[in-house]
Image (cartoon, rainbow, N blue to C red):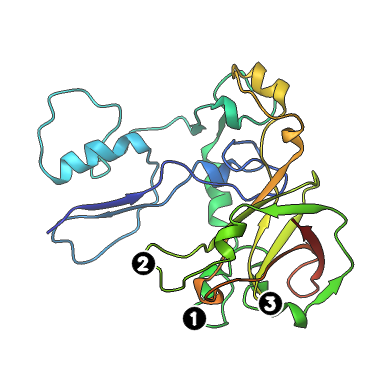
Amino acid sequence: ESLIVVTADHGAAFVAGETLRGASEGNYQEVAWVPLLVKAPRQGEGERRDVPARSVDLLPTIADHLDADLSWDLDGASLLGPRPRTDGRVELLLAADIAFGEQDENPVFDREEGFERVLKGAPPYVGGRAEVRPYRLGRLGGLVGRKVDELDVAESAGFSGRLTDKDALADVDVDDEDGVPSYVTGEVESGRPLSLAVSVNGVIGGWSGLTRTYADVEDIRRAGGDVDLPEGSQDVYTFRTFVPPSLLRDGRNDVEVFVVEGGVDDARLRRVAME
């Protein structure tokens, strides 16, 4: 009987060398498009509709489903009716603290080209244990679930890093009703566009490209931001990945980070010294 809507306010880009949320020509296809699932009351079967939609269309769509008469003007239009013509552009709001490069106005991108990139995104790798399979995403997804001992591990990566939730990973309760720390993030002191793999207890659990933590201070100021960044912080890059909860164990967990050279079939790992 319920109307259920599932969506997100923005995407996240895991493109090496780009920011996580600040859109550029290299990553906007991962920032601008988000999932949108609508389950109507008493709906039995679903369908997929590849039509232009915006977040402001959600409220009129909900009102349309509920046959509610709204007495004020809305910016969007119901997704149940004909879609208004678009100019083929995607405009994203500029946030000064996530700006990337010289930007004085909201960035505008090509909608058709961006959507084509979305559709061409690498699908999950098939195979592997069922509890690991959903995490085998992207270019290096085929590494997830493989034991580090079975891979080619070379010398040190030559730089250090630190885990954000080091203490949580050192004292895990796998039966905790509030969840387990399967979202693994951290920082490394390297500005190169690298790909990193994260292992949990000797098994690769996920991978991530390095994304810029902050834009250049001067770029932020040009974008209108008054942001007080710690000295040197613009040189710190971050990684973020979800690992299968099944890889975690009670108590202390051994989490390692590696630079990945090559692809799934010829991967060479270089260990990052984590603090």
Please give the name of the residue rendered at 71% of the width and 24% of the height, measured from the top-left corner: 217
Badge 2: how crowded within 10 Å, few (<14), some, or many (20+)? few
Which of 205 and 110 lies nearest the eye of the viewer? 205
User: Can you give x and y, in whole percent of width and height, for residue 60 in the image?
Assistant: 23, 36
The mark closer to the camera, 1 or 3, is 3
**Image: 146 above or below 90:** below
Dividing the picture into quadrants, the one containing residue 151 is bottom right
Badge 1: how crowded within 10 Å, few (<14), some, or many (20+)? few
Query: Which element carries disc 1, helix, strand or loop?
Result: loop
**Image: 214 above or below 3:** above
Query: Which element carries disc 2, helix, strand or loop?
Result: loop
Tell me the quadrant of the picture where the C terminus can be found. Answer: bottom right
Q: Kindly identify the amino acid type of the residue bearing the numbered disc 2.
A: Glu
The residue that disc 3 covers is 202
Label ID, residue 130? 1
Q: Is residue 158 left or right of residue 216?
A: right
User: Can you give x and y, in whole percent of width and height, for residue 115 in the image?
Assistant: 52, 47
The residue that disc 2 covers is 177
The answer, for residue 82, to whether it is visible in the render is no
* In contact (CB < 8 Å): disc 1 and disc 3: no
User: Can you give x and y, in whole percent of width and height, for residue 160 in the image?
Assistant: 80, 53
User: Can you give x and y, in whole percent of width and height, for residue 55 in the image?
Assistant: 36, 38
Lower sequence index among marks 1 and 2: 1
